[in-house]
Amino acid sequence: MTKKRTGKVMLSILLALSLVVTAFAYAGAAGGADAAAASKISWSKAKAIFKEELPKGATVKYVHLTRDDGRSVYKGKAVKSKYVYSIEIAASDGRILDKDKDNEGSRYTASKVGAVSKTTIRNKIKNKVPGAIIIYVKLTRDDGRYVYEAEAYKDGYEYDFEFSKRGAILEYERDKV
């Protein structure tokens, strides 16, 4: 065998060997990704953890899997009385990452002179975003006037509304959650 031919054979062997090593390395990385995906807690487990953090009688509005700050998390909202509970759970191990309780109730009622009812506002939200889950509707005082503030959720989006006390939309925002 000539030196030229021996060099070509060696080069072929080295290329084949590097392909095999690369294939095994890739398979190992993919296996690691599969293992990481398999280690995620289920939606049912996340919902159970979420419910454990809530007061008795709270109504769960949603729990869904999303990405936040480069990691997979379950986000959920629930309501009880005049409070809205927001909880974020690590999808990797079920740790509570964030927990918030907001007083979304109001000492003002829809009986303020000229104000439409909360039901009217709810219907306007349902017309604007059919199928949305309404988190809250409240009449509050803002800059010296009464307005309705409302929040709804649908398909991974949070909708924030502000209505005049007579029911006209003043502000509307849609954010990915």
Image (tube, rainbow, N blue to C red):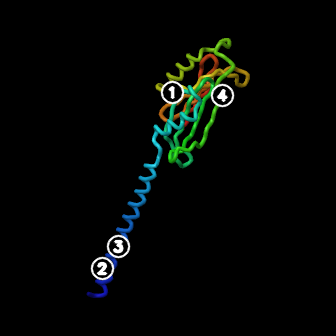
Rounded to the nearest angstrom, the CA distance separating label 1 from label 2 is 68 Å
Marks 1 and 4: which is nearer the front? 4
Marks 1 and 3: which is nearer the front? 1
Rounded to the nearest angstrom, the CA distance separating label 2 from label 3 is 10 Å
In the rendered structure, the answer to whether residue 26 lies left or right of residue 174 reads: left
Rounded to the nearest angstrom, the CA distance separating label 1 from label 3 is 58 Å
Residue 137 against residue 89 in the figure, above or below = above
Q: Are discs 1 and 3 less than 8 Å apart at CB?
A: no
Label 1's element?
Answer: strand
Write the residue at 72% across / 25% down. 143
Write the residue at 49% across / 40% down. 65
Q: Residues within 10 Å of mark 1 (few under 14, many from 20)?
A: some
Q: Earlier in the sequence, mark 2 or mark 3?
A: 2
Question: Which quadrant of the rendered structure holds the C terminus?
Answer: top right
Rounded to the nearest angstrom, the CA distance separating label 4 from label 2 is 76 Å
Residue annotated with mark 4: 103
Residue 129 against residue 6 in the figure, above or below = above
Q: Earlier in the sequence, mark 1 or mark 4?
A: 4
Marking on residue 15: 3
Q: Earlier in the sequence, mark 3 or mark 4?
A: 3
Marking on residue 133: 1
Write the residue at 53% across / 48% down. 71
Quadrant of residue 140 in the image?
A: top right
Residue annotated with mark 2: 9
Question: Which quadrant of the rendered structure holds the N terminus?
Answer: bottom left
Rounded to the nearest angstrom, the CA distance separating label 3 from label 4 is 66 Å
Rounded to the nearest angstrom, the CA distance separating label 1 from label 4 is 19 Å
- Amino acid type at image mark 1: Ile
Q: Position of residue 18 (x, y in %)?
A: 37, 71
Label 2's element?
Answer: helix
- Amino acid type at image mark 3: Leu
Q: Is residue 176 visible?
A: no
